[in-house]
Amino acid sequence: MSIAQNVKSYLQAIAGGNCFGEPVTLVAATKTRTPEEINEAIAAGITDIGENKVQEFRDKFDLIKGGNRHFIGHLQTNKIKYLVGKTYLLQSLDRDELAEELSKRCVRANVTQDVLIEVNIGCEESKSGYPLEAAWAAYERIRRTNGLRVRGFMAMLPLAGDDAAKATLVDEMRALFDRARREDENIRFLSMGMSGDWELCLGHGANMIRLGTALFGERHAPAFA
Ligand SMILES: *Cc1c(COP(=O)(O)O)cnc(C)c1O
Protein backbone atom coordinates (compact mmCIF):
# COMPACT_ATOMS: atom_id res chain seq x y z
CA MET A 1 0.00 0.00 0.00
CA SER A 2 1.20 3.48 -0.78
CA ILE A 3 1.42 6.26 1.80
CA ALA A 4 -1.61 7.91 0.23
CA GLN A 5 -3.63 4.70 0.46
CA ASN A 6 -2.61 4.19 4.09
CA VAL A 7 -3.60 7.76 4.95
CA LYS A 8 -6.99 7.38 3.34
CA SER A 9 -7.75 4.10 5.06
CA TYR A 10 -6.72 5.41 8.51
CA LEU A 11 -8.69 8.63 8.06
CA GLN A 12 -11.68 6.48 7.19
CA ALA A 13 -11.09 4.20 10.18
CA ILE A 14 -11.22 7.14 12.63
CA ALA A 15 -13.98 9.09 10.89
CA GLY A 16 -16.60 7.85 13.37
CA GLY A 17 -14.67 9.35 16.28
CA ASN A 18 -13.59 7.75 19.55
CA CYS A 19 -15.73 5.72 21.96
CA PHE A 20 -17.52 8.92 23.02
CA GLY A 21 -18.16 9.99 19.44
CA GLU A 22 -15.68 12.85 19.73
CA PRO A 23 -13.73 13.77 16.60
CA VAL A 24 -10.24 12.29 16.44
CA THR A 25 -7.18 14.13 15.17
CA LEU A 26 -4.65 12.00 13.33
CA VAL A 27 -1.10 13.29 13.69
CA ALA A 28 1.42 11.75 11.31
CA ALA A 29 4.62 10.96 13.26
CA THR A 30 7.24 11.89 10.69
CA LYS A 31 10.61 11.04 12.24
CA THR A 32 13.09 9.84 9.59
CA ARG A 33 10.60 10.51 6.76
CA THR A 34 11.61 12.62 3.81
CA PRO A 35 9.76 15.82 2.90
CA GLU A 36 8.49 14.02 -0.22
CA GLU A 37 6.92 11.27 1.86
CA ILE A 38 5.40 13.79 4.26
CA ASN A 39 4.01 15.87 1.39
CA GLU A 40 2.44 12.75 -0.07
CA ALA A 41 0.69 12.15 3.25
CA ILE A 42 -0.51 15.77 3.39
CA ALA A 43 -1.79 15.62 -0.17
CA ALA A 44 -3.78 12.52 0.82
CA GLY A 45 -5.47 14.34 3.71
CA ILE A 46 -3.10 14.51 6.69
CA THR A 47 -3.66 17.83 8.51
CA ASP A 48 -1.21 17.48 11.38
CA ILE A 49 2.38 16.26 11.53
CA GLY A 50 4.68 15.66 14.49
CA GLU A 51 8.47 15.58 14.66
CA ASN A 52 10.63 14.18 17.46
CA LYS A 53 13.90 15.90 16.79
CA VAL A 54 14.56 19.63 16.53
CA GLN A 55 17.09 19.03 13.76
CA GLU A 56 14.50 17.29 11.60
CA PHE A 57 11.83 19.84 12.50
CA ARG A 58 14.11 22.62 11.26
CA ASP A 59 15.57 20.90 8.22
CA LYS A 60 12.21 19.92 6.82
CA PHE A 61 10.18 22.94 7.91
CA ASP A 62 10.19 24.88 4.65
CA LEU A 63 10.14 21.78 2.45
CA ILE A 64 6.83 20.55 3.80
CA LYS A 65 3.72 22.00 2.26
CA GLY A 66 1.18 22.87 4.95
CA GLY A 67 0.08 20.92 7.98
CA ASN A 68 -0.08 21.91 11.63
CA ARG A 69 3.41 21.32 13.02
CA HIS A 70 3.50 19.44 16.30
CA PHE A 71 6.57 18.63 18.33
CA ILE A 72 6.34 15.25 20.06
CA GLY A 73 9.88 14.45 21.23
CA HIS A 74 12.06 15.20 24.22
CA LEU A 75 13.11 18.86 23.99
CA GLN A 76 16.36 20.21 25.40
CA THR A 77 15.99 23.71 26.77
CA ASN A 78 18.82 25.08 24.60
CA LYS A 79 16.79 24.19 21.49
CA ILE A 80 13.52 25.85 22.46
CA LYS A 81 14.40 28.87 20.36
CA TYR A 82 14.06 26.87 17.15
CA LEU A 83 10.48 25.91 17.89
CA VAL A 84 8.90 29.01 19.42
CA GLY A 85 6.51 30.68 17.01
CA LYS A 86 6.60 27.69 14.64
CA THR A 87 5.03 24.94 16.68
CA TYR A 88 1.27 24.46 16.57
CA LEU A 89 1.25 22.14 19.57
CA LEU A 90 4.16 21.10 21.78
CA GLN A 91 2.96 17.71 22.98
CA SER A 92 5.95 16.83 25.10
CA LEU A 93 5.98 19.29 27.98
CA ASP A 94 7.56 16.83 30.37
CA ARG A 95 9.23 18.81 33.17
CA ASP A 96 9.13 22.09 35.08
CA GLU A 97 12.49 23.28 33.79
CA LEU A 98 11.17 23.10 30.22
CA ALA A 99 7.97 24.95 31.17
CA GLU A 100 10.00 27.74 32.77
CA GLU A 101 12.39 28.19 29.86
CA LEU A 102 9.62 27.92 27.31
CA SER A 103 7.61 30.53 29.18
CA LYS A 104 10.52 32.99 29.12
CA ARG A 105 11.01 32.54 25.39
CA CYS A 106 7.31 32.86 24.62
CA VAL A 107 6.88 35.99 26.71
CA ARG A 108 9.90 37.54 25.03
CA ALA A 109 8.58 36.65 21.56
CA ASN A 110 5.07 37.74 22.57
CA VAL A 111 3.50 34.43 21.57
CA THR A 112 1.33 31.92 23.37
CA GLN A 113 2.45 28.33 22.96
CA ASP A 114 -0.18 25.59 23.06
CA VAL A 115 1.13 22.59 24.98
CA LEU A 116 0.15 19.14 26.17
CA ILE A 117 1.47 17.90 29.48
CA GLU A 118 3.29 14.62 28.99
CA VAL A 119 2.58 11.93 31.54
CA ASN A 120 4.83 8.91 32.04
CA ILE A 121 1.81 6.67 32.46
CA GLY A 122 3.74 3.41 32.51
CA CYS A 123 6.28 4.72 35.07
CA GLU A 124 9.05 3.74 32.65
CA GLU A 125 12.63 4.80 33.30
CA SER A 126 13.25 5.19 29.58
CA LYS A 127 10.38 7.63 29.07
CA SER A 128 9.98 11.21 30.09
CA GLY A 129 6.96 12.93 31.54
CA TYR A 130 5.35 13.61 34.88
CA PRO A 131 4.29 10.65 36.98
CA LEU A 132 0.50 10.36 36.97
CA GLU A 133 0.37 11.34 40.65
CA ALA A 134 2.19 14.58 39.85
CA ALA A 135 0.29 15.43 36.67
CA TRP A 136 -2.57 17.37 38.24
CA ALA A 137 -0.24 19.63 40.23
CA ALA A 138 1.87 20.15 37.09
CA TYR A 139 -1.24 21.07 35.14
CA GLU A 140 -2.30 23.61 37.77
CA ARG A 141 1.15 25.19 37.76
CA ILE A 142 1.62 25.24 34.01
CA ARG A 143 -1.82 26.61 33.22
CA ARG A 144 -0.88 29.65 35.29
CA THR A 145 2.45 30.11 33.52
CA ASN A 146 2.73 33.11 31.21
CA GLY A 147 3.04 32.39 27.53
CA LEU A 148 1.76 28.82 27.80
CA ARG A 149 -1.74 27.47 27.20
CA VAL A 150 -2.42 23.90 28.27
CA ARG A 151 -4.64 22.08 25.77
CA GLY A 152 -4.57 18.61 27.30
CA PHE A 153 -2.34 15.63 27.98
CA MET A 154 -0.10 13.24 26.08
CA ALA A 155 1.19 9.80 27.02
CA MET A 156 2.73 6.69 25.53
CA LEU A 157 1.55 3.26 26.58
CA PRO A 158 4.25 0.80 27.62
CA LEU A 159 4.92 -1.96 25.10
CA ALA A 160 4.66 -4.61 27.78
CA GLY A 161 1.42 -5.61 29.44
CA ASP A 162 -1.87 -7.06 28.31
CA ASP A 163 -4.72 -5.11 26.80
CA ALA A 164 -6.66 -4.93 30.05
CA ALA A 165 -3.75 -3.31 31.84
CA LYS A 166 -3.22 -0.87 28.97
CA ALA A 167 -6.92 -0.01 28.90
CA THR A 168 -6.74 0.86 32.59
CA LEU A 169 -3.89 3.27 31.88
CA VAL A 170 -5.87 5.01 29.14
CA ASP A 171 -8.88 5.21 31.47
CA GLU A 172 -6.69 6.89 34.10
CA MET A 173 -5.46 9.42 31.55
CA ARG A 174 -9.02 10.07 30.42
CA ALA A 175 -10.07 10.72 34.04
CA LEU A 176 -7.27 13.28 34.35
CA PHE A 177 -8.31 14.88 31.06
CA ASP A 178 -11.99 15.02 32.10
CA ARG A 179 -11.14 16.53 35.46
CA ALA A 180 -9.19 19.33 33.77
CA ARG A 181 -11.78 19.82 31.05
CA ARG A 182 -14.57 20.35 33.56
CA GLU A 183 -13.00 23.58 34.71
CA ASP A 184 -10.94 24.67 31.73
CA GLU A 185 -12.39 25.20 28.26
CA ASN A 186 -8.91 25.20 26.70
CA ILE A 187 -8.57 21.49 27.43
CA ARG A 188 -9.27 19.61 24.20
CA PHE A 189 -6.77 16.86 23.49
CA LEU A 190 -5.89 13.52 24.97
CA SER A 191 -3.04 12.37 22.73
CA MET A 192 -2.53 8.63 23.13
CA GLY A 193 -2.21 5.95 20.51
CA MET A 194 0.54 4.81 18.14
CA SER A 195 0.57 2.25 15.34
CA GLY A 196 0.30 -0.72 17.68
CA ASP A 197 -2.29 0.54 20.15
CA TRP A 198 -4.39 3.30 18.57
CA GLU A 199 -7.62 1.29 18.53
CA LEU A 200 -7.35 0.45 22.18
CA CYS A 201 -6.67 4.12 22.97
CA LEU A 202 -9.64 5.40 20.96
CA GLY A 203 -11.79 2.78 22.64
CA HIS A 204 -10.94 4.33 26.02
CA GLY A 205 -11.24 8.00 25.29
CA ALA A 206 -8.15 9.29 23.50
CA ASN A 207 -9.04 11.84 20.81
CA MET A 208 -5.66 12.37 19.17
CA ILE A 209 -3.44 9.61 17.82
CA ARG A 210 0.12 9.72 16.47
CA LEU A 211 0.86 7.20 13.75
CA GLY A 212 4.23 6.59 12.11
CA THR A 213 4.82 3.11 10.75
CA ALA A 214 1.11 2.52 10.09
CA LEU A 215 1.18 5.36 7.55
CA PHE A 216 4.74 5.27 6.22
CA GLY A 217 5.88 1.68 6.69
CA GLU A 218 9.02 0.65 8.55
CA ARG A 219 11.19 3.57 9.62
CA HIS A 220 14.25 4.51 7.60
CA ALA A 221 17.42 3.49 9.40
CA PRO A 222 19.36 6.76 9.44
CA ALA A 223 17.41 9.84 10.35
CA PHE A 224 16.72 12.24 7.49
CA ALA A 225 19.56 14.77 7.16
C1 LIG B 1 7.51 7.53 16.65
C2 LIG B 1 6.45 8.06 17.54
C3 LIG B 1 5.10 7.78 17.32
C4 LIG B 1 4.63 6.84 16.22
O1 LIG B 1 5.10 5.55 16.43
P1 LIG B 1 4.67 4.36 15.45
O2 LIG B 1 4.74 3.16 16.31
O3 LIG B 1 5.63 4.35 14.33
O4 LIG B 1 3.28 4.64 15.01
C5 LIG B 1 4.17 8.37 18.15
N1 LIG B 1 4.53 9.18 19.16
C6 LIG B 1 5.80 9.48 19.40
C7 LIG B 1 6.12 10.40 20.53
C8 LIG B 1 6.79 8.93 18.61
O5 LIG B 1 8.07 9.21 18.89
Image (cartoon, rainbow, N blue to C red):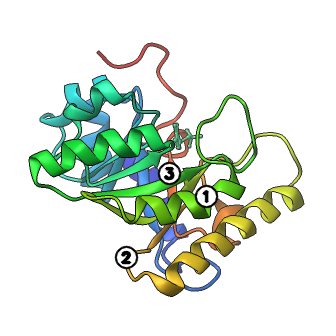
- Mark 2 or mark 3, earlier in chain: 2
Q: Position of residue 134 (x, y in %)?
A: 65, 55
**Residue 186 bears which disc, if any?**
2
Discs 2/3, front: 2
Q: Residue at x 87, y 57 (%)?
A: 165
Residue labelled with disc 3: 210
Discs 3/1, front: 1
- Mark 2 or mark 1, earlier in chain: 1
User: Dot 1 lies on which element?
Assistant: helix
Crowding near the residue tagged with mark 1, few <14, some 14–19, many ≥20 C-alpha atoms within 10 Å? many
Position of residue 40 relative to residue 192, above or below, is above
Task: For marks 2 and 3, give the CA distance.
Answer: 21 Å
Q: Position of residue 94 (x, y in %)?
A: 51, 43
Position of residue 225 relative to residue 24, above or below, is above
Q: Looking at numbered disc 2 in the image, what kind of residue is underneath it?
A: Asn
User: Dot 3 lies on which element?
Assistant: strand
Q: Quadrant of ligand 1?
A: top right
150 sits to left or right of 209: left
Residue labelled with disc 1: 135
**For disc 3, does the CB lie below 8 Å from ligand 1?**
yes
